[in-house]
Amino acid sequence: MKGKFRWVIVSIIALTILINYLDRSALGFANGAITKQFNINNAEWGLIGSAFSIGYLILSFVGSPIIDKIGVKKALSLSAGLWSVFSILTAFMGSFVSLFLVRVLLGGSEGPAFPAVSRAISRWLPGKERGKALGMIVGFGVPFSLMIGGPIITQLMESLGWKSPFVILGTLGLILVGIWLWLFKDSPIGYHRVSPQEQEYIKSGLVEEETTEHVKKVEWKKIFTNKNLLISAFGYFSWGFMFWGFMYWLPGILSQVYHLNIVKVGFFTVLPWAVGTVATIAGGLIADKLYKRKPGIRSRFNLIGVCLLLSGASLIPIMFNPSLYGAITFISLGVGFGMVTGSIWWIVAIDSAPDQPAAASGFLNAAFALAGIIAPTAMGFAIQITGSFSAGFGVMIVLALLSSIGFLFFTKEKQGSISEEQRIKTIVQ
C-alpha cells in the first residue's frame, strides 16, 4: 500500500478554498442589514462590492514571487490567516469608508491563495492525478461553496445577526490555518507522515520544473499582441462581469425586486449555483471529449463561444420582469451555461501562449479580477440612477454576445499546441 496522505492535503486545501469563497460571498447576503445600518445607497453598496477585487487584482500579480520566496506553507498560512482576521474585522466596521478598506484588505489577502494552491498540488501529486485534484478544488469547490453558502449564511444572519457569519467564517479559517501548519510541508519527500512507498509514487510523477525554480523573463509585447489571448481575456472579463454581478447582487435582486426575507433569499440562491456546480463538472468532461474528437485549440474556443452565446441569451427574458420562479430559472440557465467554461479558461490561455503560460494565465486572471471591480459598482450606479436592475442585465447580455462572436469568428487555430500532459503540468505551476 503506497498510502494516501496526499489526499488529506488535497482535502484541507479544498476546505480552505470553500471558506475562501464563503468569505467572498457573505457580504452579498448582508445587503439589506448593512445598507440600513450604515445608511448607504445602491451606488455606494456597489463600490463596497468592488473593493474586494481591487485588493485581489493587485496581490494576484505579486503573489507568485512571494510564494516562490517564502514557500507554500508560509504563504498560504499568511494568506488564510490574514483573510480570516479581515473577515472577523468586517463585523466591527462602523462606516462606509472602514468597510470599503477592510474589503480591499480581504481581497488582497486572498490574492495569493490560488497560486499557492496550484504550486502545492504540483509538489504533492504526480501529473496523472492533478486533473482530478484541481477539478475537486477549483471546478467543484467554487460553485458548490456558493450553493451551500446561501442557506447557511442567511440562517446564521436570521438567528444571530448579520455580523455572525463573518466572525464564524473567520474563526473557522484560523482553525484551518492551525491544521495546515501542523500537517503540511512544502514537499512530501522526506516527510515522516508520508510513507516511503507514497513518497516514491509522488516523486516518480514529478519533473525537473516541479522540484526546482525557473524564472523566465516575460515578453509582454507578445502577450499584448496575441489575438487569441486578447479575445480570451475579453471573454473571461465578460463572464466575470456576470459571475461577480450575481455573486454580489443576486441577494439584493431577490430582496428588492421580489421582496423576499433573508431566509428565503438564501433558499432561492441555491438553484443557480447548484446548476453551476453540475455545469462546471460537465464542462470539463465535454471539453475533453471534443478535444479527443478533434484536437486543436478551436474545439475549446467553439465550446466557450457557444456557451457564452447561450448564457447571454438566457438572460434576455429577465429584461421583461418575469415572475420570481421565471427569474430564478433564467438566471440559473445563464449561470449554468457560463460555468460550463469554468475549467477551460486556463487551458485556452496556455494554448494561446504555450511559451509563456504563467504570464498568459495571469493576464486572464487579471481580466476576471477587473470584472470584479467594475461589475458590482456599475450595477450599483445603474440601479441608483434608473431604479431598476435591467441595465445591469443588459450589460451582461451584450458582453456575453460580443465575446461569443469573438470566439466563434475571430480566433484562429494555432499549430503546435502543447500536449495534454504538458498542459496539466503547466497549469499547476
Image (cartoon, grey):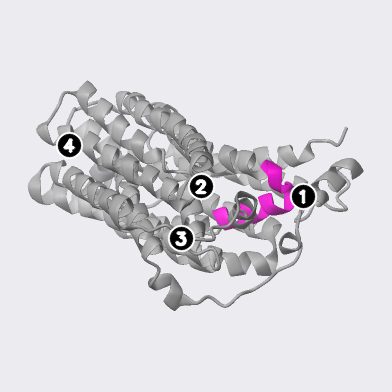
Amino acid on which disc 3 is placed = Lys
Q: Residues within 10 Å of mark 4 (few under 14, many from 20)?
A: some
Residue 61 coordinates in the image, percent (x, y): 49, 67
Q: Earlier in the sequence, mark 4 or mark 1?
A: 1
- The verdict on residue 87 being magenta is no
Residue 11 lies, with reference to residue 264, above or below; the image says: below
Q: Is residue 101 visible?
A: no
Q: Quadrant of the N terminus?
A: top right
Q: Earlier in the sequence, mark 3 or mark 2?
A: 2
Q: Residues within 10 Å of mark 2 (few under 14, many from 20)?
A: some
Q: Which residues are magenta?
A: 113-129
Q: Earlier in the sequence, mark 1 or mark 2?
A: 1
The CA span between labels 1 and 3 is 29 Å
Viewer-nearest of discs 4 and 3: 3
Pick whichever, 49 or 57, lies toward us: 57
Amino acid on which disc 2 is placed = Pro
Picture disc at residue 298: none
- Quickly name the residue at label 4: 316
Discs 2, 4 touching: Cβ within 8 Å: no
Discs 1, 2 touching: Cβ within 8 Å: no
Q: Residue at x 47, y 46 (%)?
A: 344
Q: Earlier in the sequence, mark 1 or mark 3?
A: 1
- Quickly name the residue at label 3: 414
Viewer-nearest of discs 2 and 4: 2
The CA span between labels 2 and 4 is 34 Å
Amino acid on which disc 4 is placed = Ile
The CA span between labels 3 and 2 is 11 Å
- Quickly name the residue at label 2: 295
Residue 388 coordinates in the image, percent (x, y): 12, 41
Q: Is residue 212 visible?
A: yes
Pick whichever, 228 or 357, lies toward us: 228
- Quickly name the residue at label 1: 205
